[in-house]
Image (spheres, rainbow, N blue to C red):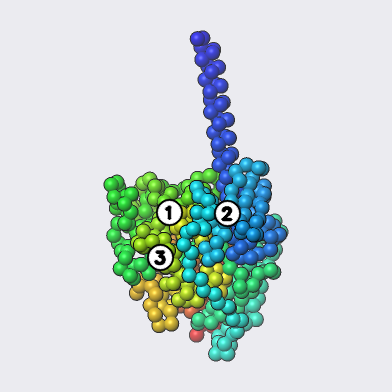
Amino acid sequence: MSWKKIIGYSILFVLLAALAYGLNFGLNYAYIGSSYAAKTVCSCEFVSKRDSASIRAQDLYAVPFATTAVDRTAKTVSATVYGLARVTAIFREGLGCTLLNETTAEELRQQPGIPLKSGADEPSRLPKSLFSEVDQPALQQAIEAAFAEKDPAHPIRTRAVVVVYKGEFIAEKYASGLSAQTPLLGWSMTKSVTNAMVGMLVKDGKLDIRQPAPIDEWKADERQKITLDDLLRMSSGLAFEENYAKPGDATYMLFRAKGAGAYAINSKVAAAPNAVWSYSSGTTNILQEVMRRQFGNLAEYRAFPHQRLFQKIGMTSAVLEPDASGTYVGSSFMYATARDWATFGQLYLQDGVWQGERLLPEGWVKYSSTETPHSGGLYAAQFWIDHADKSFPPDAFMALGFEGQSVTIIPSKQLVIVRLGCTPNEADFNRSAFVKSILATISNR
């Protein structure tokens, strides 16, 4: 064979390989886009019970090319991108929506449910005892400003704001079509709920955060040194790509894997534990997988956050969604009303004590809000902090989520501030300035 033919065949091989790679990459994009659309529409339709037109107009901006079909009888949503990669999500009462990854709707319906408990929110009223401590007109002005749309090209889409002062709801506002009864997605604020679940198992003596994580898959290699504290602080040293702009670890884990935690457990080592800080939703889902293994069966694990946390503090709207394997997606998928998100923040403001009962271990809130080394003064343990901004309250800590979700807890001011929204570019909503504007309306008493 001549050199010309060899070169020609080599070029052809490279072109065919590139074409195959491109097709595979494009198909992965289609699957991720379809999965995102199916899961989003399903939860917005059946958990939040929102208007279909608003869901399409606001929540699918990242996948405008996706086509969805809602079956309200079967309570499923299917989605496809250009006719490729059809994916389905199914709704189950109390469990929200789950993608049918490597499973069927029938198999998911056979999984155990959770103990349901309903409750109605009462209208908030400013207690007379706080009249002199709150500049109510200024507070309302600050809240109105959080909803103001100044540039159609950069929408902020604030959906709900709730302010709690000294344990009382003192102000709230909702976008058109939403109300105090509308559960809304917290995205990564769910990580802080995972923190609470770990804390309760620490209180029960079932977990020790200073000991190596009880993961059998890690016992024979260098990952055996990783502690639960390392996982809580995003300092495990595990390789995990937190990138949602393309197919990768984060998108595959959330939208394609049958088990999010099981997928993340297979992550390789990139650095020694506690040597670097690297934000990773994978480590949070590993924590959920660890917790599931502490229970005798799936039903006990499923009931745990509801019986020990949500029902205890009155978060009756909370829906923590599981993956197809049955494990909660503790990094990203919890819905609750703005008031219930505020109630969760109030539990941490009260040092983990609710109506005289200690739900979280003594010292857990301090641990959870203490700066993690190498994080640049920005992260604690499944909660964020902001020590880099010297004008921000130094004792504040936050549950934060994608698209501008936030629960800001300021113990020194006895203040919890919730903002929920759908802000495509999070920088378009200045969370720090918003919090400071609320703070300015509260007296220093």
Q: Earlier in the sequence, mark 1 or mark 2?
A: 2
Circle 2 — which element?
strand
Kindly identify which numbered label has been placed on residue 89: 2
Q: Amino acid at mark 2?
A: Ala
Q: CA distance from mark 3 to mark 1?
A: 18 Å
Marks 3/1 in contact by CB < 8 Å: the verdict is no
Nearer the camera: disc 1 or disc 2? 2
Task: Find residue 436 and report its image quarter.
Answer: bottom right
Judging by the rendered image, the residue that carries numbered circle 1 is 261
Amino acid type indicated by mark 3? Glu
Report which residue position mark 3 lands on.
Answer: 300
Q: Residue at x 59, y 39 (%)?
A: 26
Reply above or below: 133 against 38. below
Residue 123 placement (x, y as % from top left): 61, 81
Image position, residue 83 (x, y; %): 66, 42
Q: Position of residue 400 (x, y in %)?
A: 51, 63
Q: Quick one: 42 or 158, which is closer to the camera?
A: 42
**Residue closer to the observer: 199 or 435:** 199
Give the label on residue 54, or none.
Answer: none
Which residue occupies 62% across, 42% down? 84
Q: Is residue 296 visible?
A: yes
Residue 441 appears in the figure: no
Q: Nearer the viewer, residue 318 or 324?
A: 324
Q: Secondary structure at mark 3?
A: helix
Residue type at the position of mark 1: Gly
Q: Earlier in the sequence, mark 3 or mark 1?
A: 1
